[in-house]
Image (spheres, coloured by chain):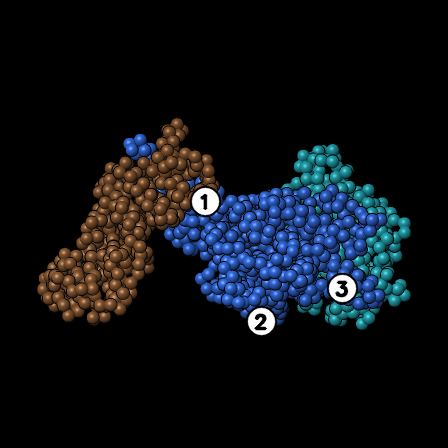
Chain colours: A blue, B cyan, C brown
Amino acid sequence: MTAIATDTAHAKARFDWTAPVLWLFAIVLVALIVLPLSWLAVYSFTDKTRHVTLQNFVTLFSDPDFLDPLLTTAIIATTSAALCCILAAPISWLVSRTDMPGRQTIRALVTASFVTPPFLGAVAWELLAAPNSGLLNQLYRFVTRADSDAVLFNIYSLPGLIFVISCYTFPFVFVLVANALDTMPGELEDASAILGGRAWTTARRVTIPLALPALVAGALIAFLQAMTLFGSPAILALPAGFHTMTTKIWSLFQYPPKLELAAAAAVPLLLLTILLLQAQKFILGRRGYSVVGGKYGAPRRVEMKGWRWAALIFCLIVLLNPVFLPYFALLNAAFSPNATTLATPSTLTFHNIVFVFTELSSTALVLKNTVILGTATATIGTMLALVIAYVTTRHAIAGSRVLGFLATAPVAVPGIVLGVGLFLSYTRPPFVLYGTLWILLIAFLTINLPAAYQQLQAAFATIHPELEDASRILGASRLQSLIRITAPLLRTGVIATWCFIFIGVMRELSAAIVLFTSQTKVLSVLIYDLNESGDLAAIAVLGIAMLVITFAVVLAVNRIPTFGGSAGARLRNS
Amino acid sequence: MKRTMKKPSRRDVLKGAGAVALGAVFAEPARAAAPPPEAITPELIAAAQKEGKVVLYSSMDLPVGEKLGKAFEAAYPGVAIQIERSGSERLFQRIAQEFESSIHACDVINSSDASHFIPWKKNGWLMPFVPDEVARFFPEAYRDGDGMSATSRLYLSSIAYNTNLVKAEDAPKSYADLLDPKWAGKMVKGHPAYSGTIMTATFQLVREFGWEYFEKLAKQRVMQVQSSTDPPKKLALGERAVMADGNEYGVVLLKEAGQPVEPIYPAEGTPTISGPTGIFASAPHPNAAKLFQAWLHTRETQQFFVDFTAQYSVHAQVTSKAGRRKISDIKLMKEDPAGVEAMSEEIKTRYAKLFRV
Amino acid sequence: MASVELRGLTKRFGTHAVVDDVSLVIDHGKLVCLLGPSGCGKTTTLRLIAGFLEPSSGEIRVGPRVVSSSARTLPPEQRKMSMIFQSYALWPHMTVSDNITYGLRLRKLPRETIAKKLGAILSTTKLEPLALRYPGELSGGQQQRVALARALIVEPETLLLDEPLSNLDANLREEMRFEIRRLHDQYRYTTVYVTHDQSEAMTTADLIAVMNGGRIDQLGSPEDIYDRPQSEFVARFIGASNVIKGTARDANHIAFANTTLQVVGAPLSAGQSAAVAIRQHDIALATQTPQNTGNMLPARVLRQVFLGATRDYLVEIADGTSLRIVTSPANVVAEGSEVWLTLPPARCRALAR
């Protein structure tokens, strides 16, 4: 007894780092979020001499040039969300609850849709569906021998923009619904079956109502995403002749910049987002995420019988739009002398690739910046999310709930709004971070933190708190227990979160477009610039390079890219 | 920006216009303010190589600009060039934004909106530097009296059409023709809020035809793009049949590469765009900047401009390429940078109102 | 070596007091059982002792030191306690040996010492062949022994057990009950054992604290609790009791169902409503009128079940009260028959509350 007693006397003298570390993270969070939002508030409610005024709002709301984009954005977001739900719901049901063949492939294709940045998809769809030069329209004219004025698809239109946005927003709905269906206990449907319910009845009365909250959550996320996208509208709306809220805010940065109006224009977006998130919480009640219960049976798969192949074809046709067609268009443009002419073996050229990688002087710098930022944001963001998820799940410090709120708050801030806020915060002393990679790092961290935090929070829920308690009672501090016990057990969750943030950084344009300078340019901004000058072939090459990098990183870290799934999901699909 | 970039008063505008006019007549007093001309010396080259890099902000067509950059790197190994390409109006805004936060990333600026140099000069942002060849071979009208800039390239914003979609006899011949209803939904043009070329061209057209012209043009459902380098490309793709404005050298290059495009020089006159280049006083690589500026205006480089980029040069010793229209054969609209500077706000606002973006 | 003392310990979640003014002294080397139904606050009390929760008021002392109070609470890692959790909480990413030696490695003991202690505990808990397995590969009983080994190897002053046997089957549970007591006797640490199973409590504890609604209802040795329950709750919870409600005639008689019953236990005052407990197996059931006339009640058999070692009767008294009686299996009376019940006065305990 005495030997142990003297050793534990040592233990008491050790400084417990837990509390200071946790407080440090709290301060970082506050700086990330509270600072830009405060500057936003200052600028929107004051005039150039910094006197408080509501004039900015009056100017904006009395100007039809501002109200029109507001209406347009509302239409886009609503229609997009509806479209995403209509498509994602059946596909997730097919993948999760039936024996349709190729489920694994479909999941991978949805992952590919998520990895593809929406602005790249928009450019690819320009190549496909520009009214006169688009590949699909050329095909249509060729097949129907219509004259050169006949147009099947016009991507430069409001429906065109809605279509492209939906293509790259529907993975969000899919993931939420598929996850809910994956983790639904099989017994619930068995109970219905035993009582005589046939497959469709069970689906209608048991499965769908249980998945409905996830669908609602997904619809709201899709709405928010569609509302706050910048890249796709910037590429497609200008030729179509209209503005959305995000392009309008950006246009207020044109010389001479009207920062007060830009800040004021951001406020409705912010308020609408907060409103919707509250509505989501209200609809879903206190239920957040379904806990992965290990004791439940695997879900019973509905047999599709004669419908199996039809179902698969349906899924593939839907996924044609975000994946197959755009990727084909990009590959074609990369190797073709003229971006919308089909490359044939005789006209195939490597000139575009040579141009991008040897002549284009920004390529190396941009690739370097992007990979550095991607890796740094993913690593720092995962650590930040891990600690905050721990603090809030285990209530480790007083006010942990406030911390959790702050970690999810950035969801309410659209990317371009955050860009404006950060611009206002960090282009002035004492912290002039504009012109460095740091300001981009802060922006990307803030944007990706909420999703990372929620993922890790859900992962934490699967770890029994007694595992940490057992470590603590044997003499380890909270921090030690987090490092030795919890973190290793969260390995898959941590890796998935890292990849998720990396992908998010690759895709990000709305904040980057406001914050970049020539030395801190990233790939998304370069692609946007190239679209401005009409260099579609260069975009295709860079876009493919971006996709290759992202897929390579994700595969290397994960081996099988089943988004939203884990080893468990893989087993479920086999 | 609000403090330093006040809208110039009418007096300032007049002063500016007067200086240009005077400069044309009384060459001597104006030139006295400029520093003595400098040649490219081995010391300059060595200093530039020590700096190792030069950053150029330019609105030149991207492949054209990069080709230029590669030629510079070949001429002076050890000095890498990074070209930041964007529409001139966007570049102007970015520079203002960067300078506001004391970020000096740009060494050399080439803008297709000559009026930009007026406020830059007034703010003292530019470095006076007169390359030897500019002093000897560049006409007064095409270089700044105080040595702050020189016109590196001259080109046009013309009309053009896709020869697969439009027969030569049906093609529009004038700006007035563009208002014909048969071209509704078939045209593409650039935007003066992004492109310096289009800003300059729009100013000249407003001066000639008034805003009524644009009011009518706006009803033609024109496809709106940003940069002036885009319409020629859209034309080549066959996306639209007619280009209402855009850089003419893009069309010529595409035509020579076998694409189905043909430029038209409107009967009323073709807007002229000069692209001056200047060095910023705060350049992070001042010697490399000087080297580039000097190299840019040598006969070889200017000839390169003419031969390989289908633009025009004002260097006295440069000859035009066979097979291309001589600039002296084209009816031109005159430039007026001071006028553009005074009107640029109004142009952006009214254009946005008319074309809804 | 120190005792553990709880003084006026209270824990509130919101306005609800889950642990309500609990006071208890656990002498060094004793095994105290916190016994009660789910929701009575026993696990919360244990977690307060461990330091995972902070008291709303009151304090906990180990020896002379205050380890928990509403002002300051020593964190679990500094309490020199050890705990076995209901879920065992074995770390799935570590082998059995790594699980067990975790505490020693934290204390940075030299490697040879750790190896020696590991060897000793493995043989005590008969886990030698499983030393390099992972917890996921073990049965419930094996996991429980690993949890035990992990807790004991650090030689704690205080050992806390949170329903450690509830996940085991009946046979294993019996075996492990004795094992825990044996190890406690061998090492003599202060043990606090939480359970809802009274046979576990009876087998292992020196002292039982029966808890109900956040309070200790009765504190005493197993015999005290069993033979002399002081409240209706304890009487019902421990052993199988009937509780008869009547009005007291005097200090040790109550009126019930038109008879008077003589009782022992808490002194009564006339006119007071009283509750009397009697064990199911203490009531005699006969078809003929018994010789002795004291504490006799007529009743009718409602139900009768043969349970092998005993026979279980449900009978109804004239005033509608039903009683359960356990007799020898040979005593067979048909349903619906009239019987006579004899309630020996010494076995009728009047309850204080």
Q: Earlier in the sequence, mark 1 or mark 3?
A: 3
Q: Position of residue C241 (x, y in %)?
A: 23, 58
Residue A131 is marked as 3
- Regarding residue C352, the answer to whether it shows in the image is no
Q: Are marks 3 and 2 in contact (CB under 8 Å)?
A: no
Q: Amino acid at mark 1?
A: Thr
Q: Which residue is mark 2?
A: A62
Mark 3 or mark 2: which is in front?
3
Q: On the image, which quarter does residue B54 sit in?
A: top right
Q: Position of residue A377 (x, y in %)?
A: 55, 47
Q: Which residue is mark 1?
A: A486
Q: Residues within 10 Å of mark 3 (few under 14, many from 20)?
A: many
Q: Position of residue A513 (x, y in %)?
A: 62, 54
Q: Secondary structure at mark 3?
A: loop
Q: Residues within 10 Å of mark 2 (few under 14, many from 20)?
A: few
Q: Is residue B84 left or right of residue A373?
A: right
Q: On the image, which quarter does residue C314 sit in?
A: bottom left
Which residue occupies the extreme top position in the image?
C112
Cα gap from disc 3 to disc 2, whole angstroms: 35 Å
Q: In front here: C130 or A141?
A: C130
Q: Chain of mark 3?
A: A
Q: Secondary structure at mark 2?
A: loop
Residue at the image position 72 percent from the left and 49 percent from the top: A541
Cα gap from disc 1 to disc 3, whole angstroms: 55 Å
Q: Chain of mark 1?
A: A
Q: In front here: A66 or C320?
A: C320
Q: Amino acid at mark 2?
A: Ser
Residue at the image position 29 percent from the left and 46 percent from the top: C193
Q: Earlier in the sequence, mark 1 or mark 2?
A: 2
Cα gap from disc 1 to disc 2, whole angstroms: 55 Å
Residue at the image position 61 percent from the left and 57 percent from the top: A99
Position above or below: A316 against C162: below
